[in-house]
Amino acid sequence: MFQQKKGNGHRSVRPFRSTGFSALLVLVLITGLLSACGSKSENEGEAQKEQPTTEASTTASSGTAVTEGNTEDTKGERTVKDDLGHDVIVPEHTERVFAPYLEDSLLTLGVKPVAQWASGTQGHGYLQDQLSGVPTLDFSSGLPSPEALMAYNPDFIILHTAQYAENGVYESYSKIAPTYVFTNASGDVEKSLQVIGDLLGKTAEAEKAIETYHAKVDDAKAKLAKVTEGKKAAIIRFAPRGISMMGGNYFSGYVVYQQLGLGKPALVQTENSATVSTEVLPEIDADFIFTVEQGPGSMKEMTDTKVWNSMPAVKAGHVYAVEPAPWLGGGLIAYGHVIDDTLKALTQ
């Protein structure tokens, strides 16, 4: 372009009489063209300098995502593995959570679910004051259909046990929203709470709740030590499917035996549960008995027997009926109720 303009400039000199004016005109044209070319060259140079920086930034970001095992994007999403090895995309913000049978942990973190677990129409009794207005979904015949769940538009789903994910449920639910599956969230309530806290951006709330709960345990142990040292407690569950004594690995048994330190009867010394019948009642070596009745009238047949009434704990008046929901619940709120009930029964 420059050479063509320059050539035109030379051809235009001859027709003009004033060579001074022509020379000035040519000089102006040349200066303008040089300035334009110079600007273009500088701009291209700057673009070349910026390009490697952009590429380096992109590479570093991708490297971080791969190293940390997280997939980062403009939405702040990340990818984690659940207990069954599924890759789960965790949104930066979750507002509509469905976590059946984990309502205790959700409420501990200050989160209300979009719908709650229920057997029939009855959810966890001890949580209903905090779950007011939350619709129930009946699990008595299995998990809700994907169509029923979609009506609540969850943006994150957490399943409390691997059994919940069977028979194609995980595949169906994960198409509705990212779905995280625990092997068994009730096996270690505190660890499960920490995981849920991480998934929902509530890590600080989880740690604070655990710290507060530990302080409650320590205070209760100090009060109970005055009356329960060397004493044993039995937790007998009267359920429609049978009568059993609870061991120390789950639900209220974990709280009473492992955290509060009461002794276990011989029948559950090394077992997580034991079947109870009239014949084995004399073998229950317990100073205190907590009865958990699921369904009205399920205790009467046994507790009306002479064998039951001849037991040392019964004769001493050390039998305490407790509400089944928290004593069969898996969460720090339920555990807190167990502690309160135990303190009330044994120290008041």
Image (cartoon, rainbow, N blue to C red):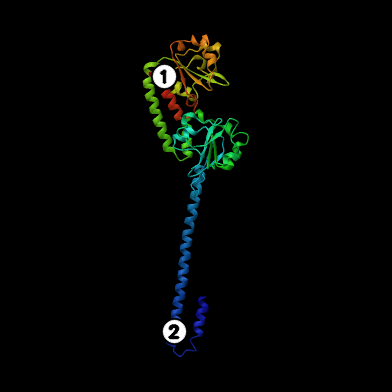
Number of dots carrying numbers: 2
Q: Is residue 322 left or right of residue 222?
A: right
Mark 2 residue element: helix
For badge 1, the amino acid type reads Ala
Query: Closer to the camera, 25 or 127?
Result: 127
Left or right for 287, reference 144: left
Neighbor class of circle 1 (other Cα within 10 Å; few <14, some 14-19, many 20+) is some
SS at mark 1 in the image: helix
The residue that appears at 52% across and 9% down in the rendered structure is 306
319, 105: nearer the viewer? 319
Horizontal relation, residue 301 to residue 201: left or right: right
Q: Position of residue 201 (x, y in %)?
A: 45, 40
Outermost residue on the bottom side: it is 17
Residue 292 place in picture, x, y as percent: 50, 21
Q: Position of residue 187 (x, y in %)?
A: 51, 28
Q: Please tell me which of labels 2 and 1 falls first in the chain.
A: 2
Q: Which residue is mark 1?
A: 345
* Circle number at residue 9: none
Q: Nearer the viewer, mark 2 or mark 1?
A: 1
At a point 46% along the width and 28% down the height, the residue shown is: 334
254 up-or-down from 310: above or below: below
Is residue 140 positioned above or below 29 on the image? above
Front in this rendered view, residue 314 or 244? 314
Disc 2 and disc 1 in contact, CB within 8 angstroms: no
Quarter of the image with the C terminus is top left
Distance of label 2 from label 1 (alpha carbons): 112 Å
Residue found at x 42% / y 34%: 207
| Residue 51 in the image: above or below residue 236 | below
Residue tagged by mark 2?
A: 23
Residue flagged by tag 2: what amino acid is it?
Ala
